[in-house]
Amino acid sequence: MAAWKEWKSRLALFALIVGPGIITANVDNDAGGIATYSVAGAHFGYSLLWVLAPTCLLLVLVQEMSNRMGVVTGKGLSGLIRERFGIGVSFYLMLALVLTNAGNAVADFAGVAASAEIFGISRFIAVPIGAFALWHLVIKGSYRMVERVFFVACLFYVSYIVSGFLAHPDWHEAARHSLVPHLGWNSAYLYMVVGIVGTTIAPWMQFYQQASVVEKGIPLKHYAYSRLDTVIGAVLVTVVCFFIVLACAVTLHRNGVTIETAADAATALRPVAGAYCANLFAFGLLSASLFGAAILPISTATSVCEAMGWESGVDRKFTQAPHYYLIYTVVICVGAGVALAAGRRMLIPIMLLSQVINGILLPFVLVLMLKIANDKEIMGEYVNSRLFNVFAYTGGALVALMSLALVVLTLLG
């Protein structure tokens, strides 16, 4: 009985702390991420499933550091970078982050438009309504209310898991390709490997998760629960990725169907996998796009305000944090406006450009994070251990190489 009471109290405590890790990881499956995994499955079948497990480990390493820095210091990542490296480094870093986040926001609102049209709803109705609803949620809401809404949004990713089962995959083949690396040396295969890693680990994630930990006020004595939240988030996002690749591999790849976007995948699934599978896939894209379109502007506003020393946070009123809400509003409006005004030919270069900036930015962010996480004046006894540094520097180098390779491959077309 005593053991059960202890477990019950621990579960209650975890329920209070959980959030930043799971939400941050799941938002990474936005329109761009879903498109990447869909194309991977449609073009290469099961052969890229092996990439997901090591990518999950890299994601845990990177996000654990940002999470720990937030709990230990009580400061956001951009604020720590400004204090440690100066306003000059912060300014150029924030400029690159704003550009890449704006491009990702455009991609997410484009995902809202495309998925809504699959259900027969005009983009000129869906995008403005979605943008206003997201803007109103943050402007009028509190951190706790916004976090609850985002938690509910995480549940919608179950639609991809159901889609994967409805596609009736060969589970033996899926398991084999998940455990045994299949190496392909052509440029298209390499691009997809790099794209999966680059899409799964993005610079905005480190800034957003650390800021969320700080805003939530997680105490250092409960850090173990916060770390568990990070690990669970990374595992959940990997499971969803697995089923997206699986659904497209067993249907589109088997039937020789090629796609360019996640909306293409949802449309193409209908004749080969049935209406239920296709509708669930499209519904997942709609909810994921709205989810990403909400988080990215918040991350942008928080990061810039921390770097410049301005007040920020969903719990503050407009008069208390005018810069925060102004940046948030501008990113929402730009993302929705460009997604409505631009045709598909214009949207793809915007998405590619945001990928390039993302790939250039991530290695610099990782280097700065590693320097801060090993600074005893900032982190005290909670600096990286030697063993953690071995994994962190190795993982950081791999992620940096993958990101730079993505830049080169994207620029080469």
Image (cartoon, rainbow, N blue to C red):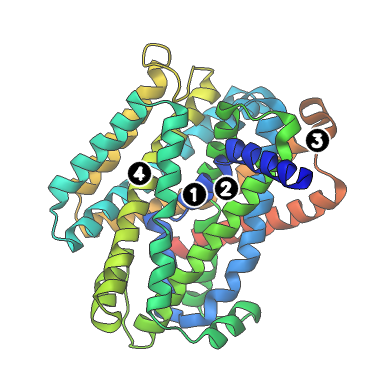
Any part of residue 312 in sight = yes
Which dot, 3 or 1, sits closer to the camera? 3
Pointers 4 and 2 in contact (C-beta within 8 Å)? no
Residue type pointed to by label 2:
Leu
Q: Which residue is mark 4?
A: 293
For badge 1, the amino acid type reads: Asn
Q: Is label 1 in a helix, a strand or a loop?
A: helix
Q: CA distance from mark 1 to mark 2?
A: 6 Å
Q: Amino acid at mark 4?
A: Ala
**Residue depicted at x 65% and y 27%:** 80
Q: CA distance from mark 4 to mark 1?
A: 17 Å
Camera-nearest residue between 270 and 325? 270
Task: Determine contact: label 1, label 2, CB under 8 Å.
Answer: yes
- Kindly report the distance in space between the C-alpha atoms of the residues bearing marks 3 and 1: 29 Å
For the residue pair 130 and 203, the one nearer the viewer reads as 130
Q: Which mark is residue 362?
A: 2
Placement of 178 over or under 388, stated as above or below = below
- What type is the residue that disc 3 sits on? Tyr
Which one is closest to the eye, mark 4 or mark 2?
4
Lower sequence index among marks 3 and 1:
1
The residue identified by callout 3 is 382
Q: Name which residue lies at 72% across and 47% down.
A: 4
Give whichever of discs 4 and 3 has the lower sequence position. 4
Residue 239: horizontal and vertical position, in percent?
Answer: 53, 65
Q: Local crowd at mark 1 within 10 Å, few (<14), some, or many (≥20)?
A: many
Disc number placed over residue 358 in the picture, else none: 1
> Is disc 3 in contact with disc 1, using a CB cutoff of under 8 Å?
no
Q: Secondary structure at mark 3?
A: helix
Q: Is the residue marked by circle 3 packed among few (<14), some (14-19), or many (20+) residues within 10 Å?
A: some
The label shown at residue 323 is: none
Camera-side residue of 5 and 350 = 5
